[in-house]
Amino acid sequence: MHSGFEEYVRARGDALRRFAYLLCGDRHLGEDLVQEVLVKAYRRWSRIEADQPDRYLRTALVRSHVSWLRRRSSGERPGAVAGERAAAGDFADQQAVRDDLWARLGLLTRAQRAVLVLRYYEDLDDRQIAGVLRCAPSTVRVHAARGLSRLRADLIPSMTEGASS
C-alpha cells in the first residue's frame, strides 16, 4: 500500500534531512523533525503523493519547525575560545567562520530563520514563503529584514574585534 512512500523517502530523504538541518541548525533536531513530519505524512500518503510531495513536505517541515514546542534539554552551547585565530585562508579558519555563522543563525527566531532558509536556500520569493508560513508577504519581509539586521548587527562587532587583533 505504501511502497510509493518508501521509494520517495529512499530517493528524497537526504534532501529532506539537509533542508531540516538548515532550519534547525542541528543535525539531530533536523532528523527528529523529518521523522515527525514523515510519520504524519505516512498516514495520508495516497493524497500527498497525488499532488506535489516535495512541496508538501517542505511546507510541513517549516510549519512544524516554527511551531515546535520541544526545546533542547540543555541550553548550553560550546563557545569560542578568546584570542584563538587561525591563519587567513586556512581551512580551520573557514570552518570557524562557518561555525560562527551557524551560531548566529541559531540566535534568530524560528520564523526569521525559516524565512532566510526559504529565501536563500530554497530560492522562494516572498509570496511563496508567505504561503508556506501562512502569513502575509509583508510579514515575510519583516522577518527577513529583522533577521538580516540582527545578523549584520552581530557581525559588525566581531569584524572590528578581528581587525584589532
Image: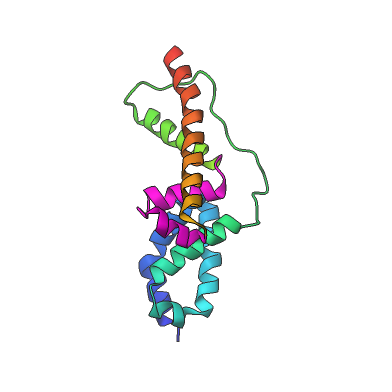
The total of numbered circles placed on residues is 0
> Which residue sits at x=47%, y=63%?
59
Q: Residue at coordinates 53% horizontally, 65% vertically from top-left?
A: 35
Locate residue 17: give its quadrant.
bottom left
Q: Is residue 17 above or below residue 4?
A: above
Report x, y in % for residue 33. Answer: 54, 60
Relative to 117, does residue 78 appear above or below in the rendering?
above
Residue 6 on image: x %, y %: 42, 76
Q: Is residue 118 left or right of residue 29?
A: left
Give the answer, above or below, for where 7 lies relative to 123.
below
The magenta segment is 107-134
Residue extending furthest toward the top: 164
**Where's residue 164, x and y in %?**
45, 12
In the rendered structure, the answer to whether residue 124 lies left or right of residue 42 reads left
Reply above or below: 18 against 3: above
In the image as oriented, which residue stretches furthest toward the right?
Answer: 73
Which residue is most to the left? 89
Query: Is residue 103 visible in the rendered structure shown here?
Result: yes
Quadrant (top left, top right, bottom left, bottom right) of the N terminus: bottom left
129 and 88: which is toward the camera: 129
Q: Is residue 121 magenta?
A: yes
Q: How is the image coloured?
A: rainbow
Give the quarter of the figure containing the C terminus.
Answer: top left
Is 115 a magenta residue?
A: yes
2 with respect to 80 (left or right) = left
Q: Nearer the viewer, residue 111 or 105?
A: 111
Residue 125 location (% of width, % of height): 37, 54
Q: Residue at x 51, y 55 (%)?
A: 30
Q: Nearer the viewer, residue 78 or 69?
A: 69
- Residue 26 visible from this viewpoint: no
Main SS, magenta residues: helix
Q: Residue at the location (55% across, 54% down)?
A: 29
